[in-house]
Image (cartoon, rainbow, N blue to C red):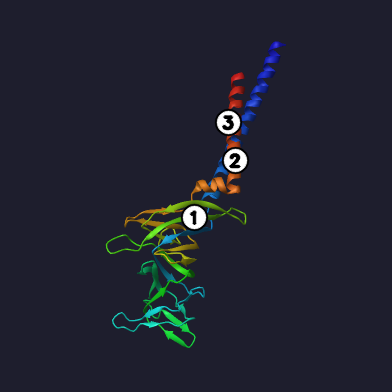
Amino acid sequence: MKNSSDFSKLTVNIELLRNFKHTKTIVKIFIFAFLALYVYVLFMPRETIYTISGETEHMEIEFAQDIINEWDVSKGLLITNILIDDSIILPEDSYLFVDNLTNVQISINERSESTYTLVLSLNNKNGSIGVIEAPDNIIELSSYAEISLPINNSFILPFHGKVYLGNDVGRGVNNILLNGNVRIIEEQLLKDGRYIGGDFPLDIGDRVELFADSQMSEISKVKGFMKITDNKYYEFIVHGEGDKVKVERLGSSGYEISPSFWYRITNDPIVAALSSVIAILFLLMEFSSLLFNYIKKEQ
């Protein structure tokens, strides 16, 4: 009877061992498949919006064709030829309408103690800058113009186009980026929501560009505005989709800013849930291994 009982027990243990081997194999296959899905979800491309804000003494914009690029240049001093004195004072209610691909460099000059002038240096390699519409006149502009606006009170200048923030620090350069911040806002997976994918401070003297592609061959078009006040600098904020931000520091190659996978794991609810499931699956696999070893030892 004892031999029969031992034989039955051995048979049961062998059967359990076979079942656990089979179960362990299934669990491993499931975990590896789930890991493949997790890696795909973690690395799949998302819509990423960059918000860059700060204070600067210099900014450069290549305008896109957009009605938002309509600027009030009333009482501004217009110069269209640097070789001769053809300057005129623009009347009240004068508005600048720029053409596509017009480039403008924005800086502030000190007019006298505690008074400043906003200087817009415009050019277009492809032709006309655009036009200035005044109440009784339309001024057709050529490929170059400079407009100096007295800053008597604060005002806003909105824009849409490619933006180059700051200036290369070097000989003869007086206007630079003073400070700033880059914020990444990423799209949540399978949900109509977003989360903050990182905050990165900018240092004085940095030069910043937002690129649309990972090869950094195309500058992103962004929307934003400048707040001009009676100071040597002005505030700015820009928003736009892109792949990464390039920061050049003191003329060096600098560094790149792009979304961090860690922020996806901690801030995206779907990715966080998948991470928890993976942790549970690993615990299950560890438990099955311990149980398998225990049965094998009992055998």
For badge 1, the amino acid type reads Arg
Give the farthest residue toward the right.
Answer: 1
Q: Where on the picture, by quarter, is residue 250?
A: bottom left
| Residue 148, picture quadrant | bottom left
Q: Is residue 49 visible?
A: yes
Q: Which residue is mark 3?
A: 286
At horizontal 48% and vertical 49% (from top left) the residue drawn is 260
162 left or right, relative to 29: left
Single out the residue that lies furthest toward the front: 113
Q: CA distance from mark 1 to mark 2?
A: 27 Å
Front disc: 2 or 3: 2
The answer to whether 71 appears left or right of 120 in the picture is right
Q: Pointer 2 and pointer 3: residues touching (CB < 8 Å)?
A: no
Count numbered badges in the picture.
Answer: 3
Upstream in the sequence, badge 2 or badge 3?
2
Label annotation for residue 183 = 1
**First along the sequence among labels 3 and 1:** 1
Residue 50 vertical position relative to residue 127 in the rendered view, above or below = above
Question: Residue visible at 65% across and 22% down?
Answer: 13
Q: Say which quadrant the N terminus sits in.
A: top right
- Measured in 3D between alpha carbons, the distance from the residue under mark 3 to the one under mark 1, in whole angstroms, is 40 Å
Q: Amino acid at mark 3?
A: Glu
Q: Mark 2 is on which residue type?
A: Ser
Q: Of label 1 and label 2, which has the lower sequence position?
A: 1
Q: Nearer the viewer, mark 3 or mark 1?
A: 1
Query: In the displayed structure, would residue 115 be above or below residue 256?
Result: below
Position in image of residue 224 (x %, y %):
49, 66
- Location of the C terminus by quadrant is top right
- Name the disc covering residue 276, or none: 2
